[in-house]
Image (cartoon, rainbow, N blue to C red):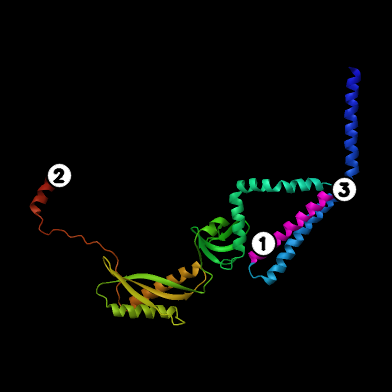
Amino acid sequence: MNESIQQSFTDIYDKLIGWLTSFINSLPNLLVAVIVMVIAYYSARIVNKWTARLASKRIDQDSISKLIGRVSAVIVVSLGLVLALGALDLSKTLNTLLAGAGISGLVIGLALQGTLSNLLSGIILSFRKKIEIGHWIETNGYSGEVVDISLNSLILKEFDNNLVIIPNKLIIENPLKNYSITEKMRIAVDCGVGYESDLDEVTKLVKEAISGVYEQHDNTEIEVYFKEFGDSSINFVTRFWVDATAAKNKLEAKSIGIMAIKKKFKANNINIPFPIRSLEFNSNLNLKNINADKRLLQN
């Protein structure tokens, strides 16, 4: 019994000594692997920075330059990992990992379907020239300036300076309005005039008011269309073109147009009616009955 216990302790001791010897023998390789990974990490950061900078000189779109830099950094880190595993003599382990990557990739792909969809959408967005950093867009119920296009999301800065993070998948799948693609925008202003107004004169005054603040170019003209007989006014819409690349420019132009029309109408005595309610009382009231009711209330 004692001999068996003693033999067990001896085996354990020999095993520990063997492990320690193996660890000491592999220390140089482990040190080399650590150095390789550290070098790969810092090299990836440098490569990311310089690759993105070189790409930006040839490519105007910043999102594509950033994507190229990130991909270059991932390649450098992957090469460092392969070299580190080779230094540790784990090439067989690496082959086993690569052999199982097919099945693992299928499982991971199913589990991360939404993430991978955003990733692919981010790559597509990065190469789209119709949406770039600095553009003012409207999508998914949000409107703002594009400040970043990453591999998984797009960041908008709204007019109130709040940031909105939208998954790239939603940007690809939903309609998008880009105000920055074109340099001109058509503005529509609705208004109404009284029934007594001369509509030919109204048309002339509206065109004079708008042309005084926004001169039309390239064969464009100010349009005035009467739409309907309203409850208290004849309603019309005027349309004109302005130089605009953001939703803010649209609001400014509409505001300036409304003020110009209001000022012009006031100077020419054109009425802009507003809904009113008239109360009509019957003048044939029986005053005797009213006085009798008052006496009853006093008693």
Residue 254 occupies quadrant: bottom left
**Does residue 21 show up magenta in the picture?**
no
The amino acid marked with disc number 1 is Leu
**Residue at point 61%, 57% (across, down):** 120
Q: Secondary structure at mark 1?
A: helix
The residue type indicated by label 3 comes to Asn
Q: Could you say where residue 127 lies in the image, as x and y percent from the top left?
A: 61, 65
* Magenta stretch, overall SS: helix
User: Where does label 1 land, which residue?
Assistant: 67
Dot 3 lies on which element?
helix
In the depicted view, which residue is nearer to us: 107 or 284?
A: 107
Q: Secondary structure at mark 2?
A: helix
Q: Residue at x 47, y 69 (%)?
A: 250
Q: Which mark, by number, is residue 297?
A: 2
State the image coordinates of residue 95 (x, y, percent, origin top left).
77, 48
Which residue lies at the image location 79% right of the left edge and 56% below the top edge?
40
Residue 170 in the image, given as x and y percentages of width and height: 54, 56
Q: Which residue is mark 3?
A: 29
For the N terminus, the image quarter is top right
Which of the two discs, 2 and 3, sits closer to the camera? 3
| In the depicted structure, whether residue 76 falls above or below residue 273 | above
Distance from Cα at disc 2 to Cα at disc 1: 87 Å
71 relative to 229 in the view: left or right: right
Q: Which region is colored magenta?
A: 62-87
Kind of residue at badge 2: Leu
* Image quadrant where one finds the C terminus: top left
Q: Is residue 165 among the parts visible in the rendering?
A: no
Mark closest to the chain's N terminus, 2 or 3: 3
